Image: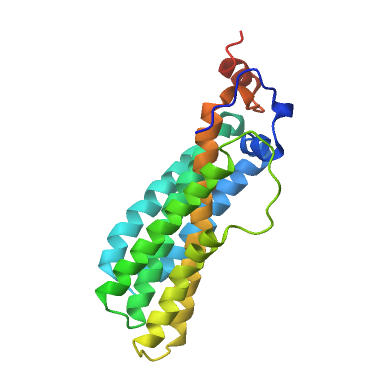
């Protein structure tokens, strides 16, 4: 993790570094926590998880949903100025839970769609872990220097390849195995994989942001003035 030299000032740092040191605006925090947890995760996952009912997926996903929801409720009950840093960590962990839950839902609908080969599920798990790894690696590389860098309009080809490999692999496997094209499981599987990638982006970006802010806390400015004085050792 990059440690910014103490003699630097915030306004001397490149824009992308400054952005990574900024907490969420206080007026957005509770909306993001509530919407991301109870709408984008709980509401979208619970009904397809319960119907049709498959115990193996239920026993893994339900505790994850319950745990992240309880944490969200606890944060929502606190003053927003007191959770500026905690909310960044929370969103990163929400990304972890969401990525896992949506990936498992994709595997569930792959099974419903007729894919039973263990090789398929092993390959999909490896590709999922590779996507998480390369997404985190990309974040570290993006913020490993305070030197100004030219803007890149498109991501490196290897990251793009990894991100499309899982849904692409599903479609190829579905038709190479010769399964009947049952449209609902196919569409739902691709939807779940797509949502999984959204949450992988959240986990990679916000977990890095949290630890980056913790490592360089003297450059972080919170709305809570008392917290600003505390992190800078001022009375």
Q: Nearer the viewer, residue 35 or 163?
A: 163
Q: What residue is drawn where x is 60% and y is 22%?
A: 5
Q: Nearer the viewer, residue 52 or 149?
A: 149
218 relative to 189, above or below: above
214 relative to 34, above or below: above
Q: Nearer the viewer, residue 18 or 191?
A: 18
Q: Is residue 78 left or right of residue 131?
A: right
Q: Position of residue 222 (x, y in %)?
A: 64, 27
Q: Is residue 119 left or right of residue 130?
A: left
Q: Is residue 78 visible?
A: no
Q: Position of residue 93 (x, y in %)?
A: 45, 45
Q: What residue is drawn where x is 46% and y is 58%?
A: 42
Q: Quadrant of residue 226?
A: top right
Q: Is residue 40 visible?
A: yes
What colouring method underlies this structural image? rainbow
Task: Name the quarter where the C terminus is drawn.
Answer: top right
92 relative to 174, above or below: above
Q: What residue is drawn where x is 41% and y is 57%?
A: 130
Q: Position of residue 215 (x, y in %)?
A: 52, 27
Q: Is residue 50 left or right of residue 150?
A: left
Looking at the image, which residue sits at the far top?
A: 235
């Amino acid at each position: 993790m990059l440690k910014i030299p103490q003699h630097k000032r915030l306004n001397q740092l490149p824009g992308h570094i400054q952005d990574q040191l900024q907490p969420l605006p206080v007026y957005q925090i509770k909306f993001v926590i509530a919407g991301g947890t109870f709408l984008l995760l709980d509401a979208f996952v619970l009904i397809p998880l319960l119907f049709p009912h498959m115990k193996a997926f239920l026993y893994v996903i339900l505790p994850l949903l319950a745990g992240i929801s309880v944490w969200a409720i606890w944060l929502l009950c606190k003053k927003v100025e007191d959770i500026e840093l905690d909310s960044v960590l929370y969103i990163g962990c929400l990304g972890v839970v969401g990525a896992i839950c949506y990936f498992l839902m994709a595997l569930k609908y792959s099974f419903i769609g007729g894919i039973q080969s263990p090789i398929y599920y092993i390959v999909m798990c490896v590709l999922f872990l590779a996507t998480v790894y390369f997404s985190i690696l990309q974040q570290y590389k993006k913020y490993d220097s305070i030197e100004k860098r030219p803007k890149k309009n498109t991501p490196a080809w290897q990251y793009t390849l990894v991100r499309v490999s899982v849904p692409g692999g599903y479609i190829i496997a579905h038709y190479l195995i010769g399964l009947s094209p049952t449209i609902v499981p196919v569409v739902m599987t691709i939807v779940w994989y797509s949502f999984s990638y959204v949450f992988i982006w959240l986990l990679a970006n916000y977990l890095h942001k949290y630890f980056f802010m913790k490592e360089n806390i003297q450059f972080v400015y919170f709305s809570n003035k008392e917290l600003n004085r505390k992190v800078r050792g001022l009375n």
